[in-house]
């Protein structure tokens, strides 16, 4: 801390996936999908060259639609049900036994293993089922016997009875992710299908992990999920509509637990989310993008992109998987490092989001500069010196009032530290003067600087401060569960003020407080600085350091115009600031503990949003190994 210095998947791998790797109000700003516009799928007529695809699409992990990319495949005609395609497939691979998915919840095939079952059956039985369900009509089209386009029909309740004789199959049965060819070069029962399609030209130099066959009888939906590989989905016959979300939308989609069998699937019903269970799901549409695909089209879905796939009646597709260059280049002994780096990046992004959104609507503590009177201008830099403070604490301060230095301290006597040289109040800019008044007022309204028993502060302030830092815990003040629990600006005016001040202005204000209000500044830091305030304060210190060269750290710079007796280098500023505390290490620990409390809450947000994990507060840093 610089400020403390100076001291699975498939089109859906349906349930078997394994993971290997501002405008309006606050709500709109919070989840408005800013920056996602450039992530929408690009569209091309035909295919790109392999090199252009690799450099412009794959390397950037952006979806892309290639219209007519595979229209020359023989399968486009031969497998078309309206042109005798079902009979053709029956003759080619009808005797093969394939594995099919049977939905327990209508036309939607969820990733949860409890939502579907897998059964083995002859391909010919599935094709016969398709023929019974659909009739070829004049003109070459197909007519479905189902009552509506959503394919709502009989939902299987007893698989053993339904499939035992294979006379009548369940309405919602899906040949999903049936291997045609895999990286192990194992012989597939339906390998003969390869005669009718070929590896797309844009994948010429790719080493494929798998090639899969997909076919549904009636309308089907693969629930939202992501794949652990790059995916090129090619439509042979029928239509599909794919809804896409970038990996950055993960918090809105509530992926299933990482330790489960369906960790690559979303737990949210995208069409009808239960916001009482998944409140962030209301923002999912802000980052989504829909793509419609017809026969001959191909869609590139990058690894990690969530997608929900709707398939019309009698839709057939082939998809190709291959591992990305990034994943191929990862070496196992670096995994722990990659994990920490990625978590840190997510934390930095979440920290910025929380602070920006928490304080975007904060009251304007920095008011417009007011016009000084002639007398005030004459007083500036000359006679407007701070005088010794009266015994009673300051409860309110108005603009233009001469402030006083701290007089009452913990033991009721004036400390030698309080006998400082006066600082010309008039040399602070009007905005900085007003902020100084605000900070002093807040401390005196919440903290008593006098009395034999030491500092006394309000119950609200005490419970809020101790709970957030984790120092004490009472039954009446439960531990916060989210970083947003302590970022309601009306409860954290100090953080609001710190957020609104430029680093250079804050440096001047803190210098005045350290020289003329040391006890007030001490109470502010030790007892009124929340985790958010500590994070903001240290960020301001970091900005001061970044704007100061190594030479300037030791060079005296003017505090204000015509104020030649208060020249301080940056190092002297830090020495003055921390020098007011009796125990320098204690104040640095207090700031760091609050900063770490903020960081921990941000980490909890990240783990909850991206992994669905809720972790407990760690032990105090002093007790860590």
Image (tube, rainbow, N blue to C red):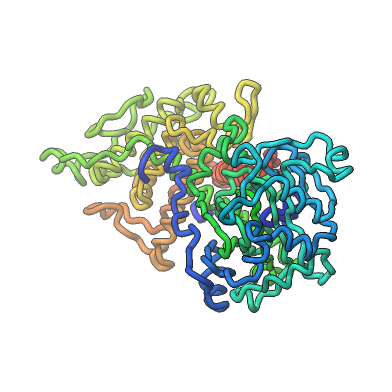
Q: From the top left corner, tell me how far across and down residue 531 is, in percent.
A: 53, 40
Query: Number of labelled discs?
Result: 0
Q: Nearer the viewer, residue 503 or 198?
A: 198
Quadrant containing the N terminus is bottom right
Quadrant in the picture for residue 392: top left
Q: Position of residue 606 (x, y in %)?
A: 60, 46
Picture residue at 62% right of the left edge, 21% below the top: 476
- In the rendered view, tell whether residue 540 sits above or below residue 205: above
Relative height, residue 493 to residue 112 (above, below): above
Q: Residue furthest left?
A: 374
Camera-nearest residue between 355 and 613: 613
> In the visual, does 440 lie left or right of 186?
left
Q: Can residue 622 be seen in this view?
A: no
* Residue at 27 percent of width and 52 percent of height: 560
* Direction from residue 396 to residue 605 in the image, left or right: right
Q: Position of residue 511 (x, y in %)?
A: 37, 47
Picture layout, residue 380 above or below residue 213? above
In front here: 507 or 411?
A: 507
Residue 552, image x, y percentages: 38, 65
Residue located at (51% from left, 52% from top):
290
Residue 210 seen by the camera:
yes
* Residue sticking out furthest to the front: 138
């Amino acid at each position: 801390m610089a400020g403390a210095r100076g001291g699975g998947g498939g089109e859906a791998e349906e349930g078997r996936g394994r993971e290997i790797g501002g405008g309006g109000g606050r709500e709109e700003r919070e989840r408005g999908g800013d920056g996602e516009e450039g992530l929408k799928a690009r569209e091309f007529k035909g295919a790109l060259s392999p090199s252009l695809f690799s450099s412009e699409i794959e390397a950037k992990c952006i979806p892309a639609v290639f219209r007519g990319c595979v229209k020359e495949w023989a399968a486009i005609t031969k497998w078309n049900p309206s042109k005798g395609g079902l009979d053709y497939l029956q003759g080619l691979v009808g005797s093969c036994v394939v594995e099919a998915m049977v939905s327990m919840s209508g036309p939607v095939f969820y990733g949860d293993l409890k939502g579907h079952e897998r059964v083995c059956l002859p391909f010919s039985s599935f094709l016969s089922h398709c023929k019974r369900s659909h009739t070829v009509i004049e003109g070459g089209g197909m007519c479905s016997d189902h009552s509506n386009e959503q394919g709502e029909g009989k939902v299987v309740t007893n698989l053993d009875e339904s499939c035992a004789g294979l006379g009548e199959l369940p309405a919602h049965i899906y040949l999903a992710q049936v291997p045609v060819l895999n990286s192990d070069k194992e012989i597939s029962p339906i390998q003969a299908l390869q005669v009718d399609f070929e590896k797309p030209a844009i994948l010429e130099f790719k080493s494929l992990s798998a090639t899969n066959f997909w076919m549904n009888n009636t309308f089907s939906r693969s629930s939202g999920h992501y794949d652990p590989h790059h995916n090129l989905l090619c439509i042979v016959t029928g239509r599909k509509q794919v809804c896409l979300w970038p990996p950055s939308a993960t918090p809105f989609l509530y992926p299933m637990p990482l330790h489960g069998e369906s960790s690559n699937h979303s737990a949210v019903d995208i069409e009808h989310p239960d916001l009482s269970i998944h409140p962030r799901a209301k923002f999912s549409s802000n980052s989504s993008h829909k793509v419609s695909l017809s026969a001959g089209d191909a869609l590139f879905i990058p690894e990690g992109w969530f997608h929900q796939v709707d398939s019309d009646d009698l839709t057939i597709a082939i998809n190709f998987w291959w591992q990305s260059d990034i994943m191929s280049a990862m070496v196992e002994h670096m995994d722990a490092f990659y994990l920490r780096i990625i978590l840190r990046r997510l934390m930095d992004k979440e920290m910025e989001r929380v602070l920006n959104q928490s304080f975007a609507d904060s009251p304007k503590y920095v008011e417009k500069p007011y016009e000084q009177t002639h007398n005030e201008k004459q007083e500036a830099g000359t006679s407007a010196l701070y005088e010794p403070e009266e015994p009673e604490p300051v409860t309110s301060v108005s603009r233009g009032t001469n402030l006083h230095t701290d007089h009452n301290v913990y033991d009721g006597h004036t400390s030698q530290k309080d006998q400082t040289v006066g600082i010309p109040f008039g040399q602070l800019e009007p905005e900085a003067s007003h902020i100084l008044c605000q900070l002093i007022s807040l401390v005196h309204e919440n903290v008593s600087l006098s009395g034999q028993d030491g500092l006394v502060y309000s119950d609200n302030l005490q419970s809020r401060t101790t709970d957030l830092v984790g120092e004490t815990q009472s039954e009446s003040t439960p531990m916060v569960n989210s970083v947003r629990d302590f970022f309601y600006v009306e409860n954290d005016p100090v953080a609001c003020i710190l957020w609104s001040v430029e680093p250079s202005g804050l440096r001047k204000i803190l210098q005045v407080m350290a020289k003329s209000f040391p006890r007030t500044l001490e109470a502010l830091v030790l007892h009124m600085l929340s985790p958010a305030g500590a994070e903001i304060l240290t960020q301001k210190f970091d900005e001061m350091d970044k704007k100061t060269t190594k030479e300037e750290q030791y060079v005296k710079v003017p505090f204000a115009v015509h104020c030649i007796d208060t020249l301080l280098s940056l190092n002297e500023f830090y020495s003055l600031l921390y020098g007011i505390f009796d125990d320098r290490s204690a104040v640095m620990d207090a700031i760091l503990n609050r900063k770490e409390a903020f960081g921990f809450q941000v980490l909890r947000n990240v783990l909850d949003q991206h992994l669905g994990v809720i972790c407990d507060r760690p032990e105090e840093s002093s007790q860590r190994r």
